């Protein structure tokens, strides 16, 4: 990381199950963040087309529930194909505003569309897709929605805003996945999530202190009122208000908060990421450097993708 960078952590509600309208909202929010000087703009886990809240996704466990089948089909229909027009539109947004854009999506592979994935897409300021990471292990009810990812995106990449990479929600509890990022020299760690619990903040503090990196953690914000009237599992939302209260935050490499956490509303958090802070904290601890014992421990990551898409 060669210079100070302004990061934007977006906590926003998607236009639920409407990929096109959500892409338009993402473009507006990216424009707003870029207008404030942000060079890195990060959106939450599964922002497009919706994070499958356990409130209703638990119904996917039913064998013959026609409502559940219809709800899953809606998610698949509004998912982001990679490659595909929606992914291209994300790239165009990044290029139009000259930012690094990181977006949580439900991904569908156009060559093998039978399985969906929980994916982070990293688009460069030139509009290219620089990195794609699929969540290694979907959590709890998520396994009824998404398939397991692979190691092809399990690394940090060199960018103009520092060495950038990340993990999705509870795969941040996987020590070897975190260490794969540390070994690749991560400086800006993306921890996109749907976990709005108080304990998640302790996790973010630990990651920042262990990685000695900046942590940008956008969390999903979702209300029952945002769902369309024709959502097949609408009855599961009756009488409910907030389904995901957020908790987005940006932390420094000592675990201190630079912005947030933000709860119960939409908003954009901003923070300046100063490279000297990395050196200051890594003098005492560098998990993959002077505080590592490669003569004792070795990690092997199989980076090959599980399907034919590059």
Image (spheres, rainbow, N blue to C red):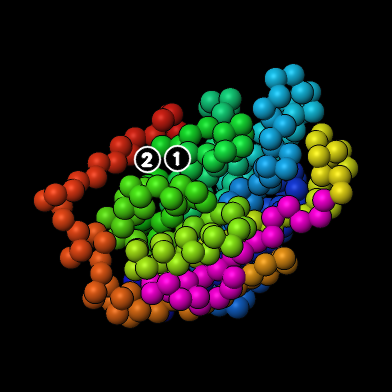
Quadrant of the rendered structure where residue 193 is?
bottom right
Q: Quadrant of the C terminus?
A: top left
Residue 74 appears at what percent x and percent y?
A: 73, 34
**Which residue does the image show at 61% across and 31% down from the upper left?**
144
Q: Say whether marks 1 and 2 touch (CB < 8 Å).
A: yes
Residue lying furthest left: 295
- 250 horizontally vs 30: left or right: left
**Which residue does the image show at 51% across and 77% down from the upper left?**
258
Residue 56 appears at what percent x and percent y?
A: 74, 39
Which residue lies under the disc numbered 1?
136
**Which residue does the image show at 58% across and 25% down from the upper left?**
114
Above or below, 110 against 122 in this view is: above
How far separated are the C-alphas under marks 1 and 2? 8 Å
Above or below, 13 against 46 in this view is: below
Sequence-wise first label, 1 or 2: 1
Which stretch is magenta? 240-261
Which residue lies under the disc numbered 2?
151
Residue 103 appears at what percent x and percent y?
A: 56, 54
Residue 98 in sight: no
């Amino acid at each position: 990381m060669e210079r100070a960078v302004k990061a934007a952590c977006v906590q926003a509600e998607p236009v639920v199950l409407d990929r096109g309208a959500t892409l338009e909202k993402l473009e507006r929010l990216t424009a707003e963040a870029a207008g404030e000087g942000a060079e890195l703009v990060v959106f939450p886990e599964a922002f497009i087309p919706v994070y499958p809240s356990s409130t209703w996704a638990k119904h996917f466990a039913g064998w013959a529930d026609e409502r559940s089948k219809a709800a899953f089909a809606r998610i698949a229909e509004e998912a982001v194909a990679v490659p595909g027009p929606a992914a291209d539109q994300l790239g165009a947004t990044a290029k139009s505003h000259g930012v690094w854009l990181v977006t949580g999506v439900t991904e569908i592979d156009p060559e093998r569309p039978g399985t969906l994935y929980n994916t982070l897409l990293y688009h460069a300021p030139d509009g290219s897709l620089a990195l794609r990471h699929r969540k290694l292990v979907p959590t709890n009810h998520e396994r009824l929605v998404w398939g397991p990812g692979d190691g092809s995106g399990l690394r940090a990449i060199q960018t103009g805003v520092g060495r950038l990479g990340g993990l999705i929600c509870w795969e941040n509890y996987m020590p070897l996945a975190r260490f794969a990022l540390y070994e690749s020299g991560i400086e800006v760690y993306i921890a996109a999530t749907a976990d709005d619990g108080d304990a998640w903040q302790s996790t973010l503090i630990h990651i920042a202190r262990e990685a000695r990196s900046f942590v940008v953690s956008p969390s999903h914000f979702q209300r029952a009122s945002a769902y369309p009237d024709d959502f097949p599992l609408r009855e599961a939302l009756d009488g409910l208000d907030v389904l995901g209260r957020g908790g987005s935050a940006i932390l420094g490499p000592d675990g201190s908060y630079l912005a947030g956490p933000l709860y119960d509303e939409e908003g954009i958090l901003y923070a300046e990421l100063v490279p000297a802070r990395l050196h200051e904290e890594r003098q005492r601890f560098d998990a993959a450097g002077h505080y590592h014992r490669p003569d004792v421990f070795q990690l092997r990551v199989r980076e090959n993708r599980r399907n034919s898409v590059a």
